[in-house]
Image: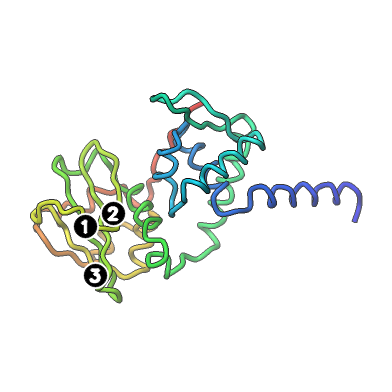
Amino acid sequence: MGSSEFVGYCSFTKAIEHLGDRWSLLIVRQLGTFGPQGFNELATGLPGRISRSVLADRLRRLETLGLVSRCAGPDPHPAYRLTEVGEGLTATLGSLRAWAETWLPDDPDMLDRDPDIVLGWLAQRADPDRAPERPVVVELRLHHRHDRRYWLVLQRGAAPYGCLTDPLLDVSRYVYLESSMPALLALARGRRDWADAFGDRSVTAAGDPELIGRVSAWFRPASDQPCAHRNA
């Protein structure tokens, strides 16, 4: 191995050593996509469950590495933002995401293991500008797991959010969906439209017929990607 190859290998090893855990790159991606965020925003916005102690540790590490710095937040607490060094990593993360979406299959057990990740994907596909004026709850069940339920709350002008417990809204505002796992993942990842899933009955619906008829309109078409808002 030549000396230049050895240097490249060492650089790669350092990157893996410092950033190869589950959370560091997710934090960078979150800040790169949504701009500066406070600690609580990061704690609730990251996909999956991260403890506050782990988040604090990862933020300290990213600050030490020069990828993240603190800035003034909307309240007395500081926010976190990407530095120029951190911004330089976002293109690499975009390439990694494109590679994963092309070559890595979805994990069929993901909804049981990390349901909030799939609900987060579904929330990103929802279009707040086309959601109902009054809140609607989309209740999800899988064909093979009738004992498990998940909820997505939609309302015009508000950020959609997923729930692992029933939000207990008025029952007239519920749409009950039953889906196969492949169909749900395809919808959540934006690879399939709701109309097609209803058409082949990989997704079935119950509830108010008027609300059922509008479900497809509440989500972006499969060809559309949610906008990524980045702050300089």
Q: How is the image coloured?
A: rainbow
Of 215 and 160, nearer the camera is 160
Residue at 65% across, 33% down: 66
Q: Which residue is mark 1?
A: 166
**Mark 1: which secondary structure?**
loop
Label 3: which residue? 201
Q: Is residue 203 left or right of residue 22?
A: left
Looking at numbered disc 1 in the image, what kind of residue is underneath it? Answer: Asp
Q: In the figure, is residue 177 to the left or right of 187? A: left
Q: Give the mark, 2 or 3, whose residue is nearer the N terminus.
A: 2
Residue position for label 2: 163
Report the residue that reaches farthest toward the front: 53
**Do residues under tags 2 and 1 come within 8 Å of each other at their CB atoms?**
yes
Q: Is residue 27 left or right of residue 200?
A: right
How far across and down, in percent of the image, does residue 14 sit?
74, 48
Task: Identify whether 132 is placed above or below 181.
Answer: above
Mark 3: secondary structure: loop
| Residue 128 image-quadrant placement | top left
The residue shown at (42%, 66%) is 113
* Quadrant, the N terminus: bottom right
Residue 106 in picture, x, y percent from top left: 46, 65
- Quarter occupied by residue 205: bottom left
